Image: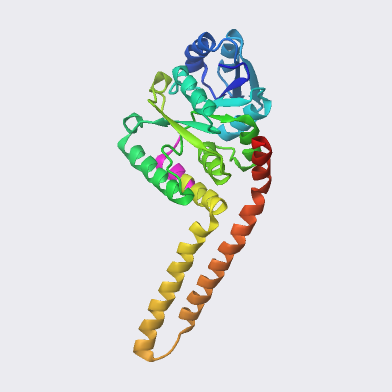
Amino acid sequence: MSRDISIILPAKNEAESLDALLPELRRQFPDEEVIVVDDGSTDGTIDVCNRNHVKVISHVYSMGNGAAIKTGARNAEGNILVFMDADGQHTPDNIRSLIEKINAGFDMAVGARQIDTHASFARRIANTFYNKLASWMTGYPIEDLTSGFRAARARHFRKFLYLLPNKFSYPTTSTMAFFRSGLPVGYVPIKAMNRSGERKSHIRLFHDGFRFLIIILKIGALFSPMRFFLPISGLLFFTGLAYYGFTYYNWGRLTNMSAILFLSSLFTFLFGIISEQISALHYKDIQETKRRTLR
């Protein structure tokens, strides 16, 4: 292990779980930088951090998990950033596996939870769906889109901070952004432990699941716009064609609705082309940085 590894834990009212987790982190990684980002906690989170001699950065009010991740990444000194939850479901034992993956040439390593460690059957189905959809969007196999246990090279991760939402879905955004930039992402199988004190996840399956879907579509449009716009354009075109066939057969004419559908298909296709160009410009600096690094 290297001294320039920073372990970052976003925490909100996690004093109980941190009281067990931090001593174990300190035992296994006595020389690494450990940062706990206190996201407006009202319990003894700060006291627990001070007792275990870890760096703590506090938000004056709760800003969200993603905001805590960004604060930690900005203040970390290490060249490799390790992110893990503070609620006890991620174990320090798996950190070395993530670092080994990074040292093997990957720019991000993700702890992929085994299917039987998800909290419920419905959550397993939802995560499987999101993984498949994101894999199709990116063209790369994504084993665990929403895992918050990951390691990444700091110089790359910080370039995407402005893309990350302030709430819980930073893993989704960061994974897809790395793929879009041509930065290799690897996976390490892990078992997610039960949350400390049998606490329930803050994620609401249906409400936040819809938000995940919107984020996937948004980042997908940024990642590969034509994968997003082309199916929509095709659907509008063939709907217009079918409706035109129906109206021509019955009344022998082209209706305004068919014309609107054809024009909508054309405009959507053009939006896709323009978005592809914008997306290429957006990642130009990332590609330049990667080329300079390889030299």
Q: Is residue 91 above or below residue 206?
A: above
Where residue 227 appears, as percent x and y from the top left, is: 49, 57
Q: Position of residue 22 (x, y in %)?
A: 52, 13
The percent position of residue 94, horizontal first and vertical second, equals 45, 21
| Location of residue 251 (image quadrant) | bottom left
> If the image is split into quadrants, where does the C terminus sit?
top right
21 lies above or below 195: above
Query: Along the line of sight, which residue is nearer the eye, 208 or 183?
Result: 183
Q: Is residue 121 above or below residue 214?
A: above
Instruction: Please tell me how many numbered marks the rendered image carries.
Output: 0
Residue pictured at 46% horizontal, 79% vertical: 258
Question: Horizontal placement of 159 versus 199: left or right?
Answer: right
Q: Is residue 167 in the magenta section? A: no
Is residue 208 rendered magenta in the image? yes
Q: Is residue 263 above or below residue 215?
A: below
| The N terminus: image quadrant | top right
Say which of 182 and 63 sits in front.
Answer: 182
Q: Main secondary structure of the magenta part?
A: helix
Dividing the picture into quadrants, the one containing residue 69 is top right
Residue 234: x and y in percent read: 45, 68
Instruction: Tell me what residue is drawn at x 38 percent, y 77 percent.
Output: 242
The residue sitting at 63% across, 27% down in the picture is: 72
Which of these two is toward me, 155 or 7?
155
Please, which colouring scheme is shown? rainbow
Report whether residue 62 is seen.
Answer: no
Query: Which residue is drawn at the image coordinates 43% and 41% (left, top)?
Result: 142
Residue 295 seen in the current view:
yes
Of residues 176 and 252, the one drawn nearer to the viewer in this rendering: 176
Give the extent of the magenta segment. 202-211
Q: Residue furthest front?
A: 295
